[in-house]
Image: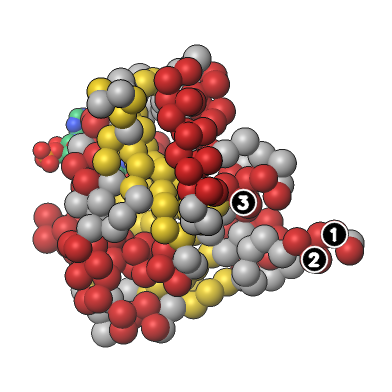
Amino acid sequence: MLKIAGRPIEIVILRCPYMNMANPLTRELFSKMMYLKYKGYGNRHMVGSLPLDTTDYVADHPLICVRDEKLGLIPISGSKVITYDTCKFFNMEFAMESCFKKGNNQEHLDSLYKIIKDSQNNNKTIAYHGGYTIDPEIVLTAEDREAVRDLFMGITALYFKENNISELLGLGVPKFKTENFFYQWGYERCAANGVELSSFPLYFLPGVDGVMMHLSKFSEGITETSQKYRFIWGQKQILGELAPIPQKVRTA
Ligand SMILES: CC(C)(COP(=O)(O)OP(=O)(O)OC[C@H]1O[C@@H](n2cnc3c(N)ncnc32)[C@H](O)[C@@H]1OP(=O)(O)O)[C@@H](O)C(=O)NCCC(=O)NCCS
């Protein structure tokens, strides 16, 4: 059994919460996931930051959890993954699109549209991956934090593989050096005409800049890392059905 900080770890995929709200466990874990973001971001960012938005309702959330005797499953780290197709299905802008529009980042927007178009031409499923945090309340040594990072990388890669997501867009936050972490996955900084696109203010995190990142090929490192977690991945709990479920919505 995999343990972090002496506590057994469970992996849970909170799948498209909005479409699965009828499930009481979905409602419970959705609320706990929001609390994790509230604490994780709130602890590191200024008041006025809002790391949750409409995409959280329809994204999948691969979560690393521990079990509390009284409170049940508690997510201690995780992220969200939302495909371009899901955004279209729910008539939403793709995750980064609104950010670039708000900031008038035309170069970034052009790059985003080009990446999306290329992925569609190549019949690839593209997704936005973001919202990574670690619960600041759980006491972790430096080794424990490293273990969480490694596990997060491994299980998220397994999630992508199992869901046939082969292309990703994400944001690096230089303040926390997360772009360096994501380079290890195979992400690259987006560029135009051979020049890296500039960092830009993240409107949902006042005072913080982000960099646009794209992954079109997983690194050998992440593939190796994911192999270590095949066993725990095999024991994961999936809360909710495949998302979205167009037939159900259309006939409702
Ligand atoms: C993203 C996150 C989970 C990474 O956690 P982590 O891998 O354990 O690493 P830390 O954040 O503790 O530290 C990363 C680096 O940022 C630095 N850092 C941390 N807080 C900082 C601050 N307030 N100001 C400047 N630098 C800071 C650390 O010194 C560290 O640098 P080092 O590696 O040279 O020592 C965590 O930073 C977090 O939850 N942040 C809030 C949510 C967020 O912004 N997510 C970004 C998603 S891309």
Q: Which residue is mark 3?
A: 85
- Whole-percent x, y for residue 159 in the image: 42, 67
Q: Which residue is mark 1?
A: 250
User: Which residue does the image show at 48% across and 34% down from the upper left?
Assistant: 114
Q: Secondary structure at mark 3?
A: helix
Earlier in the chain: of badge 3 and badge 2, it is 3
Specify few, some or many for label 3: CA neighbours under 10 Å numbering under 14, 14-19, or 20 or more: some
Residue extending furthest toward the top: 104
3 and 2 marks in contact (CB < 8 Å) = no
1 and 2 marks in contact (CB < 8 Å) = yes
Residues under labels 1 and 2: Cα distance?
5 Å
Residues under labels 3 and 1: Cα distance?
16 Å
The C terminus: image quadrant: bottom right
Residue 97 vertical placement versus 23 (above, below): above
Q: Which residue is mark 2?
A: 247
User: Which residue does the image show at 51% across and 33% down from the upper left?
Assistant: 113
Is residue 7 in view? no
User: Which residue does the image show at 67% across and 45% down from the upper left?
Assistant: 88
**Disc 3 residue type?**
Asp
Instruction: In this rendered view, identify the residue nearer to me: 223 or 176.
Output: 223
Q: Secondary structure at mark 2?
A: helix
Residue 247 vertical placement versus 184 (above, below): below
User: Which residue does the image show at 38% across and 26% down from the upper left?
Assistant: 46
**Disc 2 residue type?**
Gln
Q: Under 8 Å from ligand 1: the CB of mark 1?
A: no
Q: Is residue 173 left or right of residue 80?
A: left
Q: If the picture is divided into quarters, which one holds ligand 1? A: top left
- Whole-percent x, y for residue 212 in the image: 36, 33
Q: Under 8 Å from ligand 1: the CB of mark 2?
A: no
- Whole-percent x, y for residue 52 in the image: 53, 40
